[in-house]
Image: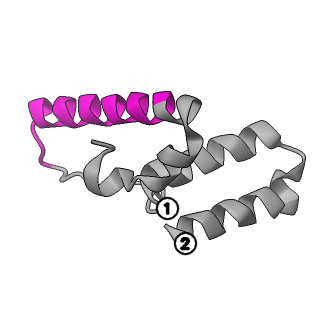
Amino acid sequence: MRYLRDMERRIRESEFWRGKPRGAEAAIHRLYLTGAGDCGGSSWPSDASQEEIDARIAAERAQQRKFTALWKRDPERARSIDWQRNGGG
């Protein structure tokens, strides 16, 4: 978690994000939600069935809703959860 907090600090201090506070907040939310492991690609197998794809999409959306709701109520608690490992549960 120290790594994520360091990344958050770097984003907030970044010259690039300084003029874009809403973008910086979105980047920070994504950082904590994905555990800094998201590089925009898919880790899903290419031969996944449509049912598996639909289930994964639904699970990701549910996790994102939980994260967003917790972030609004208690950002520090949201930061403390390893969302990739346990999904906030």
| The magenta segment | 47-69
Per the model, the C-alpha gap separating discs 1 and 2 is 9 Å
Could you say where residue 28 lies in the image, as x and y percent from the top left?
62, 50
Q: Are marks 1 and 2 in contact (CB under 8 Å)?
A: yes
Q: Amino acid at mark 2?
A: Tyr
Query: How many C-alpha atoms fall within 10 Å of the one at disc 1: few (<14), some, or many (≥20)?
Result: some
Would residue 9 be seen by someone viewing this image from the given angle? Answer: yes
Instruction: Report the number of discs.
Output: 2
Name the magenta segment's main secondary structure.
helix
Could you say where residue 82 lies in the image, as x and y percent from the top left?
38, 56
Instruction: Work out whether residue 58 or residue 78 is closer to the camera in this orientation and state it.
Output: 78
Would residue 42 be seen by someone viewing this image from the given angle? Answer: no
Which mark identifies residue 3? 2
* Location of mark 1 (residue): 36
Residue at horizontal 83%, vertical 57%? 16
Relative to 40, does residue 14 appear above or below in the rendering? below
89 to the left or right of 28: left
